[in-house]
Image: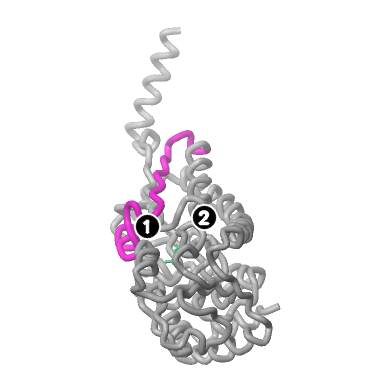
């Protein structure tokens, strides 16, 4: 009847007057630097889908892949200022703000993915997630990529001496810098979006990255050799900022939290699958010669690279490193 429609309209008007948050919609700009067909890229799309469905469009997610909106250097600044509301940078990119996250960069710290997850889920791992509050951010979850492999333009890599004097692109991390210096190579920090052209033009001789990044950004097409070294790990922290998070009504925050959990499980599974699948594709291309480190070769690398740990006891925390080592299988 007319009366009930009137009452309904009145109730809604009053509700909105009392609580404007009920009517508002929210936009999450999610900026990242990798391709869509990667664990992070696909999980970002998945998160968008479930968040928009479950909030019935009250939260819209706009994903900007491939550094289309912000590159490595700008994304965290933009997030701090609420120009974007989500990002998922690799740990190395937090170095200037939350240097203890470099623990994840330490070469040969994690034996395998189970070891890594055990550490992430531990008390120390959970506490590391909170470090970003110092920069006005909220660490929502750890997202996986995988272990890094080495690629080089001019000769195969079996032992540390094979990269002596070679220039390697690294992410902005002091640990990664030390890791290459300790074996006589020369590291150079470059944003992810510039790696392909730097390799192609010989600005650097090589780089380290996960299979999914090497595949989707075609690094293997401009490098003659790749060594499956699994020497270090590359993963991410999914972060939002406090300004945005605090602006959300509690019910939307709850939905978003549960979507993040689900997307994180999806992401972990996907990371393992995609890195495997894309390695097969790189092999099938025949464009790069692949060497798998033998157990003996791996020992030599491990011994050489683990020498850098004491340099980082202060900045990372010796007890955190010991905790990670303790969880080894
Ligand atoms: C890199 O810069 O190599 C990576 O951090 C890119 C990424 O986000 O996986």
Task: Tell me if residue 77 comes above or below residue 2 in the rendering.
Answer: below
Q: Residue at the spot x=41%, y=74% of the render?
A: 170
- Report which residue position mark 1 lands on: 242
Between the residue at mark 2 and the residue at mark 1, the CA separation in whole angstroms equals: 27 Å
Q: Quadrant of the C terminus?
A: bottom right
- Report which residue position mark 2 lands on: 38
Q: Relative to the observer, which residue lies in front, 103 or 82?
A: 103
Q: How many marks?
A: 2
Task: Locate residue 220, reporting x and y percent.
Answer: 49, 64
Quadrant in which residue 185 is drawn: bottom left
Task: Tell me if residue 225 comes above or below residue 219 in the rendering.
Answer: below
Query: Of discs 2 and 1, which sits in the foreground?
Result: 2
Task: Locate residue 215, reporting x and y percent.
Answer: 51, 60
**Picture quarter with ligand 1:** bottom left
Q: Which mark is residue 90?
A: none
What is the magenta range? 54-79
Instruction: State which tag comes first along the sequence, 2 or 1.
Output: 2
Question: At numbered mark 2, what does the secondary structure look like: helix, strand or loop?
Answer: loop
Task: Locate residue 263, reporting x and y percent.
Answer: 56, 51
Question: At numbered mark 1, what does the secondary structure look like: helix, strand or loop?
Answer: helix
Q: Relative to the observer, which residue lies in front, 315 or 182?
A: 182
């Amino acid at each position: 009847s007319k009366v009930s429609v009137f009452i309904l309209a009145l109730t809604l008007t009053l509700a909105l007057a009392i609580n404007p948050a009920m009517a508002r919609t929210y936009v999450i700009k999610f900026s990242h630097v990798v391709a869509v067909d990667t664990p992070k890229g696909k999980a970002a799309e998945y998160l968008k889908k479930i968040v928009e469905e479950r909030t019935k469009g009250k939260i819209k997610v706009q994903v900007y892949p491939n550094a289309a909106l912000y590159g490595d250097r700008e994304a965290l600044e933009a997030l701090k200022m609420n120009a974007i509301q989500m990002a998922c940078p690799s740990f190395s990119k937090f170095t200037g703000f939350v240097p203890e996250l470099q623990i994840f960069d330490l070469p040969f710290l994690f034996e395998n993915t189970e070891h890594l997850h055990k550490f992430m889920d531990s008390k120390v791992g959970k506490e590391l997630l909170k470090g970003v509050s110092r920069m006005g951010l909220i660490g929502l979850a750890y997202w996986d990529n995988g272990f890094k492999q080495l690629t080089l333009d001019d000769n195969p890599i079996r032992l540390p001496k094979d990269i002596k004097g070679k220039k390697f692109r690294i992410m902005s991390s002091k640990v990664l810098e030390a890791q290459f210096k300790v074996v006589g190579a020369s590291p150079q920090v470059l944003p992810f979006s510039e790696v392909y052209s730097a390799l192609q033009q010989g600005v650097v001789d090589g780089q380290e990255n996960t299979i999914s990044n090497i595949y989707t950004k075609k690094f293997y097409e401009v490098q003659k050799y790749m060594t499956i070294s699994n020497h270090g790990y590359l993963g991410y922290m999914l972060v939002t900022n406090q300004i945005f998070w605090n602006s959300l009504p509690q019910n939307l925050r709850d939905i978003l939290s549960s979507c993040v959990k689900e997307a994180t499980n999806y992401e972990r599974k996907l990371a393992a699958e995609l890195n495997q699948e894309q390695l097969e594709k790189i092999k099938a291309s025949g464009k790069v010669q692949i060497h798998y480190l033998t157990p003996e070769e791996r020992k030599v690398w491990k011994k050489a690279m683990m020498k850098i740990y004491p340099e980082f006891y202060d900045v990372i925390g010796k007890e955190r490193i010991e905790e990670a080592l303790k969880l080894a299988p």
